Image (cartoon, helix red, strand yellow):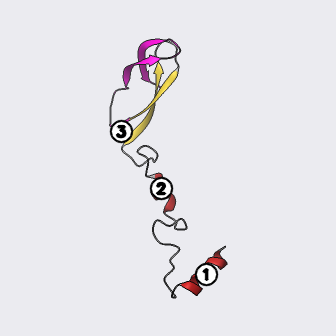
Amino acid sequence: MDKLVEQLSSEFLPAGDVNHAAAGSRRSSDFRRHSASAGYASSGHTGRARIVLACAQCGGRNYRKTKARREGSRPLALSKFCSTCNAHTLHREAV
């Protein structure tokens, strides 16, 4: 495949115009880093931590959220709908 690209580029483009390692191209080494940082919680370098909320009554893990990474922050507890209990119950941050 590379030989074919080089051959076609040498026929149709002046020498030196093809740069396969350009930033953002699929062949560059930093392509995965740039594409992974598109999601707000997909990479570990964001300021947010992924958490799971579990029902306080049945223990079902129903919700996934993100929260800011802060020293000494208290665990999150919200009133959410639990489909297992079929009621609004307290959901706490699961460990």
Q: Position of residue 8 (x, y in %)?
A: 61, 81
Instruction: Using the image as rendered, state which of residue 79 and residue 9 is in the foreground.
Output: 9
> Is disc 2 in contact with disc 3, using a CB cutoff of under 8 Å?
no
What residue did someone put label 3 on? Answer: 69
Q: Would you say 13 lies left or right of 67 here? A: right
79 left or right, relative to 22: left
| Whether label 1 touches label 3, CB < 8 Å | no
Q: Name the residue nearer the viewer: 88 or 30.
A: 88
The residue beneath circle 2 is 35
Q: Residue at x 33, y 31 (%)?
A: 73
Where does residue 4 sit, x and y in percent of width and height?
A: 66, 78
Mark 3 is on which residue type?
A: Arg
> Mark 2 or 1 closer to N-term?
1
Residue 33: give x, y in percent of width and height.
47, 57
Q: CA distance from mark 1 to mark 3?
A: 51 Å
Q: Residue at x 51, y 58 (%)?
A: 32
| Chain-order first, disc 2 or disc 3 | 2
For label 3, the crowd category at 10 Å Cα-Cα, with few meaning under 14, some 14 to 19 and many 20 or more, is few
Secondary-structure class at tag 2? helix
Position above or below: 75 against 9? above
Q: Amino acid at mark 1?
A: Leu
How far apart are the two marked residues, 2 and 1, measured between alpha carbons? 28 Å
Magenta stretch bounds: 67-95
Q: Secondary structure at mark 1?
A: helix
Q: Relative to residue 53, is residue 37 depicted above or below?
A: below
Tag 2: amino acid: Ser
In the image, what residue occupies the spot 37% across and 21% down? 78
Disc 3 secondary structure class: loop
Q: Tell me where residue 18 appears, x and y as whole percent.
A: 51, 79
Q: CA distance from mark 2 to mark 3?
A: 23 Å
Tag on residue 38?
none
The residue where tag 1 is placed is 8
